[in-house]
Image: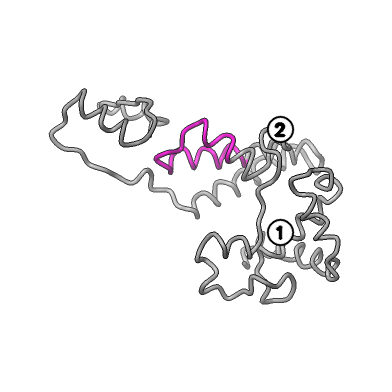
Amino acid sequence: MRRFAAELEAEGIEFDYRRAPWLTAGLDAHRAEHRPSVVTATEPASWDGREMLGRLRHAIDEVLPRFGPHEDAVLSTSWHLAHELVEWMWSGLVDGAEWVMLPNVIGMALHADGGRMATKPYAGGGACIDRMSDDCRDCEYDRRKRIGEDARPFTTLYWGFLARHEDRFARNPRVARQVRAARRLTDLDDVRGRAAEVLVRLDRGEL
C-alpha cells in the first residue's frame, strides 16, 4: 500500500508507513503511537494471477514492436516483464519489501539480470512442483512425463529450457549437473520439439 501513499493522502486518508523487522512489530508500534479504537485487516490487494498475466502480456505487446527481432528487444522486454512482476508483488503481498522483491523476482525467479544477483535460474519441473505443493494431486497431466499429450508442461519446459541454454549453464557449477542430465536424455530431440509446441500453445491460450 505504501506505493499508493500519495493517492491515499490526496483523498484525505492518513497514511503511516514505517519500517519494522516483521509485520506484527510494525502493527504494535503503530498502535502504541496512534492508539486506534479499531484495527481492521484487509487483503493486501485485489489483483490476482490473471491480472498479472495480462500485465505481462501487455509488456510483451508494447515493447517488442519498438525494437524488432534482435537482442535489444529481448533484453528490454525481459526488464519490462521483471518490472511489471515486481510492481504486482509489491502491491499484492503484505511483506513485499523492496529488498526482498528485487533480488527474488528479478534475480532468482526470472533470472532477468543474467546471473549478476542470483547465481542460477530457479527453474523447476513437475517433480519439483509436486514436492513443494499439492498442485499435482488432481492435475490431468503426468508430472513424470516429458513428451506426449499428457506430459506435464512444466516438466517439458524445464528440460527444454536446460537444453536450449546448455552451453551457458554447463559452466555454472550450480546447474551443471542438471545440464549433464539433460544431455543424457534419450528423447531430448523430442523434448525440444514438444517444448517449442507448448510455448506456441501457451501463446495462443490453449494451455
Mark 1 lies on residue: 158
Instruction: Return the x and y of residue 69 as percentages of the image width and height.
Output: 80, 44
Along the viewing direction, whichever of 82 and 72 lies nearer the viewer = 82
Disc ID at residue 146: none
Look at the picture and state if 133 lies above or below 150.
Answer: above
Q: Which residues are magenta?
A: 81-104
At horizontal 38% and vertical 48% (from top left) the residue drawn is 46
Give left or right: position of 113 versus 1.
right
Along the viewing direction, whichever of 69 and 202 lies nearer the viewer = 202
At horizontal 83% and vertical 51% (from top left) the residue drawn is 166
Q: Secondary structure at mark 1?
A: helix
Q: Is residue 86 magenta?
A: yes
Residue type at mark 2: give it.
Arg
Give left or right: position of 26 versus 162.
left
Disc ID at residue 116: 2
Instruction: Return the x and y of residue 181 as percentages of the image width and height.
Output: 80, 60
At horizontal 54% and vertical 38% (from top left) the residue drawn is 86
Instruction: Return the x and y of residue 37 as percentages of the image width and height.
Output: 13, 34
Instruction: Return the x and y of residue 134 as percentages of the image width and height.
Output: 50, 66
Look at the picture and state if 14 lies above or below 102.
Answer: above
